[in-house]
């Protein structure tokens, strides 16, 4: 029974997903200011261009 438990690899996928999420969250925290600035510029550009289309 112990050998069978050791050979099971069902939990490996879950661990990999958790590690990927941790890395992504860490990157978002590190680059929070840059991402915020980028998103603000993008939405500002969208607003400006949509006003041009509506006129």
Image: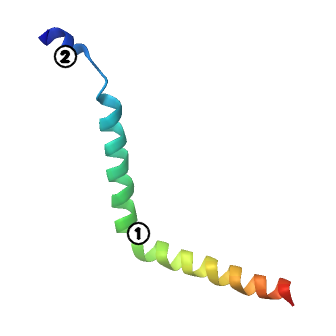
The residue under the point 39% across, 55% down is 24
Q: Is residue 23 above or below residue 38?
A: above
**Image position of 43 (left or right of 55):** left
Question: Which label's residue is closer to the chain start, 2 or 1?
Answer: 2
Q: Nearer the viewer, residue 50 or 27?
A: 50
Mark 2 sits on what residue? 6
Display colour scheme: rainbow
Q: Residue furthest left?
A: 2
Q: Quadrant of residue 29?
A: bottom left
Mark 1 sits on what residue? 31
Q: At which x and y percent is residue 3?
A: 16, 9
Q: Residue furthest right?
A: 55
Tell me the CA gap for discs 2 and 1. Answer: 39 Å
Q: At which x and y percent is residue 12?
A: 31, 29
The residue under the point 28% across, 29% down is 11
Q: Secondary structure at mark 2?
A: helix
Q: Quadrant of the C terminus?
A: bottom right
Q: Secondary structure at mark 1?
A: loop
In the drawing, what numbered circle is on residue 40? none
**Image position of 26 (left or right of 49):** left
**Label 1: few (<14), some (14–19) or many (≥20) C-alpha neighbours in 10 Å:** few
Q: At which x and y percent is residue 1?
A: 14, 9
Q: Quadrant of residue 30?
A: bottom left
Q: Nearer the viewer, mark 2 or mark 1?
A: 2
Q: Are marks 2 and 1 in contact (CB under 8 Å)?
A: no
Q: At which x and y percent is residue 21?
A: 36, 50
The residue under the point 48% across, 76% down is 36
């Amino acid at each position: 029974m112990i050998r069978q438990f050791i050979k099971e690899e069902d939990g490996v996928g879950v661990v990999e997903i958790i590690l990927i999420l941790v890395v992504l969250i860490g990157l978002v925290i590190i680059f929070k200011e840059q991402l915020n600035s980028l998103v603000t510029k993008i939405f500002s550009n969208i607003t400006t261009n949509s006003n041009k289309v509506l006129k």
